[in-house]
Image (tube, helix red, strand yellow):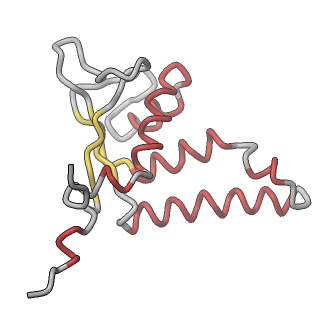
Amino acid sequence: MAFNIKARSASETGIIELKAGDGSPLTDDDGNVLSVTVHSPASKQWEQAQAAMNRKRAERMRKNGGKLEAAIDNAKADQVAFLCAITIKFNGDIEHPDAQNSADLPRAIYEDDTLGFIRDHVFAEAGDWSSFTGGSAKG
């Protein structure tokens, strides 16, 4: 019988355990590891968010005579918008002074430069297929 390759499909969502600035697990005051649930590259939400980010960059390049530098001028804002679009929720009892409710929490965290390590980590992990394909890799 032939192997069904679909058995190794990526999940459309996944949980990314957050890391502190030093690379250790990010925990709350009780030692619980904090995480975020996001849409994966296999999802329509991720695809649409990626396309929106690419369109913004291309438009900035077009408006600035094709200069590549223009594409990255608002890299942080693009990254924040992308992450907000793919983030389903932060897991754990997390609050931020700039968030009035749980819907505001992702933007408050991702825009906070003192928490930039979270933004950078989630951005990197969310684009890594291995974060969503547990059945693909063999140890």
Q: Indicate the position of residue 41 as horizontal and vertical percent values.
A: 40, 61
Q: Indicate the position of residue 79 as horizontal and vertical percent values.
A: 56, 44
Q: Indicate the position of residue 121 as horizontal and vertical percent values.
A: 44, 35
The answer to which of 21 and 35 lies nearer the viewer is 21
The answer to which of 15 and 77 lies nearer the viewer is 15
Q: Using the image, determine if residue 93 lies above or below residue 84.
A: above
Q: Quadrant of residue 77?
A: top right
Q: Quadrant of residue 31?
A: top left
Of all residues shown, which one is farthest toward the left?
1
Q: Using the image, determine if residue 44 lies above or below residue 73.
A: below
Q: Is residue 35 left or right of residue 79?
A: left
Q: Identify the residue at image location x=61%, y=47%.
A: 78
Q: Identify the residue at image location x=66%, y=64%.
A: 55
| Quadrant in the picture for the N terminus | bottom left
Question: How many marks do you count on the picture?
Answer: 0
Of all residues shown, which one is farthest toward the right?
65
Q: Indicate the position of residue 84 as horizontal and vertical percent values.
A: 45, 46
Of all residues shown, which one is farthest toward the top?
29
Q: Identify the residue at image location x=50%, y=59%.
A: 49
Q: Is residue 89 left or right of residue 41?
A: left
Q: Is residue 80 left or right of residue 57?
A: left
Q: Identify the residue at image location x=21%, y=76%.
A: 6
